[in-house]
Amino acid sequence: QVQLQESGPGLVKPSQTLSLSCTVSGGSIRRGDYYWGWIRQHPGKGLEWIGHIHYSGSTYYNPSLKSRVTMSVDTSENQFSLKLNSLTAADTAVYYCARERCSSTSCLDSYYGVDVWGQGTTVTVSS
Amino acid sequence: QSALTQPASVSGSPGQSITISCTGTSSDIGAYNYVSWYQHHPGKAPKLMIYEVGLRPSGVSNRFSGSKSGNTASLTISGLQAEDEADYYCSSYTFGATLFGGGTKLTVL
């Protein structure tokens, strides 16, 4: 059974860059029908999709965050990562890494939802 | 403001049925059958309950069902149980992005 585990700092200063990693265990990140992504939840608010990446390197980002987001994948380590720059207090949230299952050609051909989630890591942006 | 609109809260008594709505547009929910529903108990990871509008992953109770009409999707939980009390989120995939609703808090009275 595939499991995801986030790692990264719990406290980051404003204007700095947040770097989070997600380790995939129990399965390979090199599956064509999976996209590996990040979802966050602000305190007391709903879920917000940040974006996802395919092991081939194709990325899709939330248009509202696109200018500040970079995702990457390390197939040798079975990990994927998130960088979010120019942080403000509004980026304080619980960050989940997640697996979205799609068809092997495109999520627009078939989309089966987020079937695996990490436990989430709390990130606070404060000086 | 979330991309998809859900009621903030719903409630029901044990054994009853409840329905949570999720309204989008003709570009997302109305365009594709890629609606998913998630159950989220605070402090835990969300859990996929429904995908492709009305399909249940293995292990999810058949008390949970989903449907869609036009730009609105719905999640129905029948035979409410105490453990169903949680936050529920709808989601729709469209044009290279995944949208979420604002979430609905289900209270089992």
Image (tube, coloured by chain):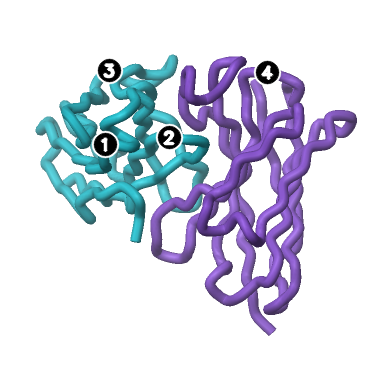
Chain colours: A purple, B cyan
Under mark 1, the amino acid is Ser
Residue B92 occupies quadrant: top left
Under mark 4, the amino acid is Gly
Which residue, given by chain and number where applicable, does mark 3 sit on?
B62
> Badge 1: few (under 14), some or many (20 or more) residues near its Cα, within 10 Å?
few
Disc 4 and disc 1: Cα gap in Å? 29 Å
Disc 3 and disc 2: Cα gap in Å? 27 Å
Residue B94's disc is: 2
Up the image or down, A91 lies above or below B55; here it is below
User: If you read the primary sequence from the N terminus, does the residue marked by circle 3 or circle 2 appear first?
Assistant: 3
Residue A75 occupies quadrant: top right
Dot in front, 3 or 1 = 1
Dot in front, 3 or 2 = 2
Residue B38: x and y in percent read 39, 37
Look at the image and tell me whether residue A119 can be seen: no
Dot in front, 3 or 4 = 4
Under mark 2, the amino acid is Thr
Which residue, given by chain and number where applicable, does mark 1 sit on?
B26
From the viewer's side, name the closer residue of A40 and A83: A83
